[in-house]
Amino acid sequence: QNADTAIFSLNPRLGTKNAQKKIIELKNKLGGLTELNLSQNSGTSELIEALEAIGYTRQEAFKASQTITDPTSPLSVQLNLVLRQMDRK
């Protein structure tokens, strides 16, 4: 419903483009709350990949990526904010 491809990226066999395709297919059947913004979702995927590269699990990275309020901000800013939030926990 939220058109978030990052949730599909938890499956290692499903890439971003296939996730976008699945969202479109499901949206036609179920409806959706937001429009699919392809540029926004790629930023979320990059953030998840960056967090995984420094040692976080995919699940931790996905959960942390959901806390970003401005997905259009640069990746470095998003990563800095997420790491600060994770450090507090």
Image: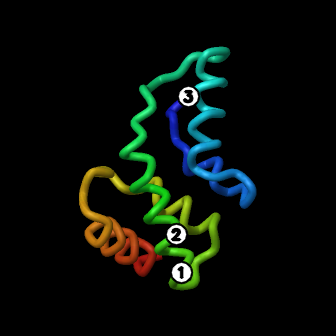
Q: Mark 1 or mark 3, which is nearer to you?
A: 1
Residue at image mark 1: 53
* Mark 1 or 3, nearer chain start: 3
- Identify the amino acid type marked 3: Gln
Q: Amino acid type of disc 2?
A: Glu
Q: Where in the figure is residue 33, as x and y percent of width and height? A: 47, 23
Which of the marked residues, 2 or 3, is nearer the chain's N terminus?
3
Question: In the image, what residue occupies the spot 52% across and 69% down?
Answer: 49
Which residue type does callout 1 highlight?
Ala
| Residue under label 3 | 1
Indicate the colouring scheme.
rainbow
Find disc 2 in the rendering and name its residue: 49
Q: Residues within 10 Å of mark 3 (few under 14, many from 20)?
A: few
Which corner quadrant of the image does residue 5 belong to?
Answer: top right
Contact, CB < 8 Å: mark 2 with mark 1? yes
Does dot 1 land on a helix, a strand or a loop? Answer: helix
Residue 4 horizontal side relative to residue 78, left or right: right
